[in-house]
Image (cartoon, helix red, strand yellow):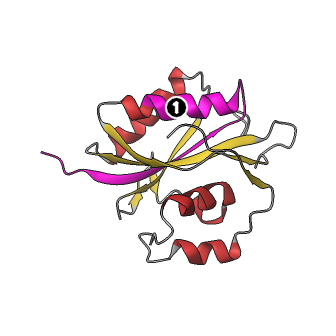
């Protein structure tokens, strides 16, 4: 029997009703048998990282408990993206209906061709760090870096918290 692990998932969308896309994904994942939603951040509006000629993103972070292995969890996240119309294009950081990133999986560090945890970009992305801090202000990352230390150098410019909806 697998042991349940706490994991953090970043959510983002900037196409076809981004607020609804993120809320729909949170709702679907909360109902998934292999996941138990423990907490979620409020929504944040952020500027796109990639090409500037795309809409702003809506982002959030959710904390789940799961017994899924990391790659099985990644498969589950990518299946949810596909259900919501995600098409993986050739433009890096281009617009998308839904982006689900496995940010942290317990205290594990994972480097495989399909998955790197902690998520490699999370250390400097305010749209990840601020919602993550909202959920777990005392969080220590697998490399023993305190989340609060990362926020000292990652400013909230361009990040706008939105009214809390749902849970």
Seen in the picture, residue 83 relative to 46 is either above or below; the reply is above
Q: Quadrant of residue 14?
A: top right
Residue drawn 68% across the image and 60% down it: 126
Instruction: Examine the rendering and report whether any part of residue 147 can be seen.
Output: yes
User: Which quadrant holds the N terminus?
Assistant: top left
Magenta-span inclusion, residue 129: no
Q: Which residue is mark 1?
A: 25
Q: Residue furthest left?
A: 1
Q: Position of residue 130 (x, y in %)?
A: 62, 61
Q: Position of residue 152 (x, y in %)?
A: 67, 77
Quick one: SS at disc 1?
helix
Q: Nearer the viewer, residue 67 or 112?
A: 67
Residue drawn 87% across the image and 37% down it: 53
- The magenta segment is 1-28
Q: Position of residue 89 (x, y in %)?
A: 67, 30
Residue drawn 55% across the image and 63% down it: 133
Instruction: Examine the rendering and report whether any part of residue 88 can be seen.
Output: no
Q: Along the horizontal axis of the image, is 68 left or right of 157? A: left
Q: Position of residue 30 (x, y in %)?
A: 40, 34
Q: Quadrant of residue 37?
A: top left
Seen in the picture, residue 20 relative to 6 is either above or below; the reply is above
Dot 1 crowding, Cα within 10 Å, few <14, some 14–19, many 20+: many
Residue drawn 24% across the image and 50% down it: 4
Q: Nearer the viewer, residue 11 or 41?
A: 41
Seen in the picture, residue 57 relative to 133 is either above or below; the reply is above
């Amino acid at each position: 029997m697998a042991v349940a692990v706490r994991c953090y998932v970043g959510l983002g969308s900037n196409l076809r009703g981004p607020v609804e896309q993120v809320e729909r994904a949170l709702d679907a994942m909360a109902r998934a048998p292999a996941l138990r939603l423990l907490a979620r951040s409020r929504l944040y509006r952020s500027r796109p990282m990639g090409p500037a000629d795309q809409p702003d993103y809506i982002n959030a972070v959710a904390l789940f408990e799961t017994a899924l292995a990391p790659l099985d969890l990644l498969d589950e996240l990518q299946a949810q993206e596909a259900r919501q119309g995600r098409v993986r294009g050739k433009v890096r950081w281009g617009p998308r209906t839904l982006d689900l990133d496995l940010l942290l999986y317990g205290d594990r560090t994972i480097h495989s061709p399909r998955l790197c945890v902690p998520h490699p970009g999370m250390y400097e992305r305010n749209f990840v760090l601020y919602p993550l801090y909202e959920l777990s202000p005392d969080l220590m990352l697998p490399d023993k870096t305190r989340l609060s230390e990362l926020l000292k150098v990652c400013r909230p410019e361009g990040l706008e918290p939105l009214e809390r909806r749902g849970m």
